[in-house]
Image: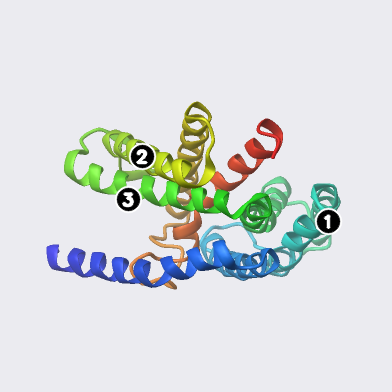
Amino acid sequence: MASSKSKEMITRIITALILLPLSIFLIVKGHNHLFFLVIYLISLLGVWEFIKIVKHDTIIVYNKIIWFSGAVVPFIIYFFGFNAFVLSSFVLLFLILLIKMFSANPTENVIEEVSYNFFAALYIPFLFTFIPLLKNIGFEWVLFLCFVIWASDSFAYFTGVALGKHKLIPKVSPGKSIEGLIGGTLGALIIAYVLNYYLLKESLYIMAIITVDVIAAGVIGDLIESMMKRSAKVKDSGKLLPGHGGVLDRFDSLIIAAPVLYFYLIYVAGK
């Protein structure tokens, strides 16, 4: 058992060492549209993983609608804005209702099936798009988001292993502890301070608020995916990233934290 965990940790570290410099280079030096395209392709992988997860449930899944949304929605938000997204959401909901209406069982499980597929169609493409939207504000905010989330996850893991005794939400994620959450928060605050000192130059008070908000959103994002996977009775969203699982296993925190950071910067900080 210890040997297998050690091998998994080594694989995890090697994967991170390969992907980390590539990610930083793309964030810092990549053109905004190129960065959007990369995140768009990653989100499509996320859609593929999400379809596999939801297929374990009992509700009928409209694959074509989910793929259509995954392919179109990010472009609509990124290039045309949120008003166009509202229109596209209405079109999606209308199409899902029509599909149900002309299905073999149009009067059975209507609310469950329509709600399920509407959520499945929008969850991944909508949330992923906030990452390139952040880069439009400034690449430093994408770096901040990524490093704070990664630091929070790493410090929480090692603190939890060393000191974890009190479970956070055991029915959702039995491995997460309150001690790990505290350790992850403190570690992420240190990383945020370093990034702020060298890159962002915001007031310490503001950065503390932003960092805590991002950490909280990241933890909630992680728990949301754990909740979905437990419902579908799957361990990982995929096996694309050795030692890390699938795309959703790596981005579950980021895609919830990204809109929190984006809306703060737009509507509170006025960026």
Farthest residue toward the left? Answer: 2
Q: Is residue 209 above or below residue 77?
A: above
**Viewer-proximal residue, 211 or 56?**
211
Compared to residue 204, the image places residue 61 above or below, namely below
Mark 1: which secondary structure? Answer: helix
Query: Circle 3 — which element?
Result: helix
Query: Amino acid type of disc 1?
Result: Phe
- Work out whether residue 200 can be spotted: yes
Point out which mark residue 80 bears.
1
Question: Is there any visible trace of residue 169 in the rendered image?
Answer: no
Residues under numbered marks 1 and 2 in contact, where contact means CB atoms less than 8 Å apart: no
Q: Could you tell which of marks 3 and 1 lies nearer the N-terminus? A: 1
Give the spatial CA distance, label 3 vs label 2. Answer: 13 Å
Label 3 sits on residue: 154
Q: Secondary structure at mark 2?
A: helix
Mark 3 packing: few (<14 Cα in 10 Å), some, or many (20+)?
A: some
Query: Which amino acid type is shown beneath numbered disc 3?
Result: Ser
In the displayed structure, does residue 118 sit left or right of residue 209? right
Q: Is residue 138 above or below residue 31?
A: above
Name the front one of labels 1 and 2: 2
Q: Are marks 3 and 2 in contact (CB under 8 Å)?
A: no
Specify the quadrant that holds the C terminus: top right
The residue pinned by badge 2 equals 190
* Residue 38 in which image quadrant: bottom right
Other residues around mark 2 within 10 Å, as few (<14) / some (14–19) / many (≥20): some
Q: Residue drawn at (76%, 65%), measured in percent from left and top?
A: 72
Query: Percent position (x, y) of residue 270?
Result: 71, 35
Seen from the viewer's position, the closer of residues 244 and 111 is 244
